Image (cartoon, rainbow, N blue to C red):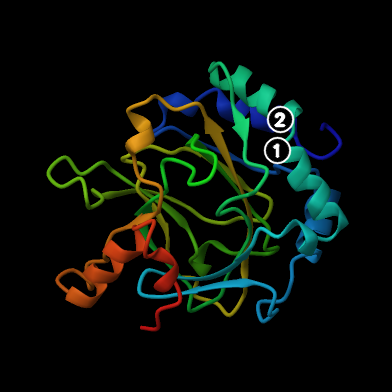
Amino acid sequence: MRDYINLKNLGKSMRTFYNKSPFPYAVIDNFFKPSIANKLEKEFPKYKDKRLHEYKNYCEVKKTSNNWNFFPPLTYKVFSLLNSNQVTKFLSKKLKIPKVIPDYGLHGGGWHLMHHKGKLNPHLDYFIHPKANLQRKYNLIIFLSKGWKENWGGEICFYKKNKKNMKLPGDLTTKIYPKFNRAVFFDVSNHSWHGVLQPKRKVIRNSMAVYYLINPSKKDLLSRKKVFYAPTNKQKGNKKILKFIKLRSSSKHFSKVYRKNK
């Protein structure tokens, strides 16, 4: 594990995890060893690769893959490591919780690619894994686009809890720009609103995503199994978009709308 991940940086960043707002998170710079990060970036596919899964709708425009057979050797090895007992036990110890469970299927995770017309509205991630019936508890996102500048957009954004309307995020409080080899680790809850600002340059924003699970309570098993988006300020009041958001969050109808054209 130490040959791939900067455990010193990870451990140091996790010390203040629970002190952050609007919800617990940690930013880990130089997450991978430099040689590993450089090789991982080169293994990303081209945005036009037909094997990628495309999301193209009112709230999300991006491409992804969680297909293990598609991953080149180092990427395969790193995703395996991030889901290993070594890593989950390390996280459990640092987070002081009994058990962190990996998601070997990378449901919703894997490679994420976004171009300059990309989009990811503020949203709440699925709370209960639709296949494993475990609670999604933590997100790990690692940015792997070399040379990304602060004024290029593509920041991951965190929003306050909206006490007046639980179906909308509160104020934007935190922006984290996708610096190369920077990781963001954050808590997933029913008020962990987050999204991505649209990239401004014709450069692909590459990231790796791994999600960690825990055993849910009986009450939590009744919670959301699909992502729930919020409309942007410009989209509020648009009946078509509001209908889309309802369908996208439905376990029954989501697959019919994720490629819905604008």
The residue at the point 40 percent across, 79 percent down is: 260
The amino acid type of the residue labelled 2 equals Val
Secondary element under disc 2, as helix, strand or loop, is: helix
Q: Quadrant of the C terminus?
A: bottom left
Note whether residue 180 is visible.
yes
Is disc 2 in contact with disc 1, using a CB cutoff of under 8 Å? yes
The residue at the point 64 percent across, 43 percent down is: 29
User: In the drawing, does residue 262 fall left or right of residue 117?
Assistant: left
Give the image location of residue 162, x and y in percent: 20, 44
Q: Which of the pair 107/109 is nearer the observer?
A: 107
Which image quadrant for residue 205? bottom right
Label 2: which residue? 87
Q: Quadrant of the N terminus?
A: top right
The amino acid type of the residue labelled 1 equals Asn
Say few, some or many: other residues with alpha carbon within 10 Å of mark 1 (under 14 / 14 to 19 / 20 or more).
many
Give the image location of residue 155, x and y in percent: 48, 58
Say few, some or many: other residues with alpha carbon within 10 Å of mark 2 (under 14 / 14 to 19 / 20 or more).
some
Note whether residue 22 is visible.
no
Label 1: which residue? 83
Foreground tag (2 vs 1): 1
Q: State the separation of the CA atoms marked 2 and 1.
A: 7 Å
The residue at the point 80 percent across, 43 percent down is: 33
The residue at the point 63 percent across, 48 percent down is: 182
Q: Which of the pair 193/28 is nearer the observer?
A: 193
Q: Which of the pair 237/153 is nearer the observer?
A: 237
Q: Which of the pair 245/166 is nearer the observer?
A: 245
Of the numbered discs in the image, which one, if any, rests on residue 43?
none
Which image quadrant for residue 39? bottom right
Secondary element under disc 1, as helix, strand or loop, is: loop
User: In the drawing, does residue 200 fall left or right of residue 7?
Assistant: left
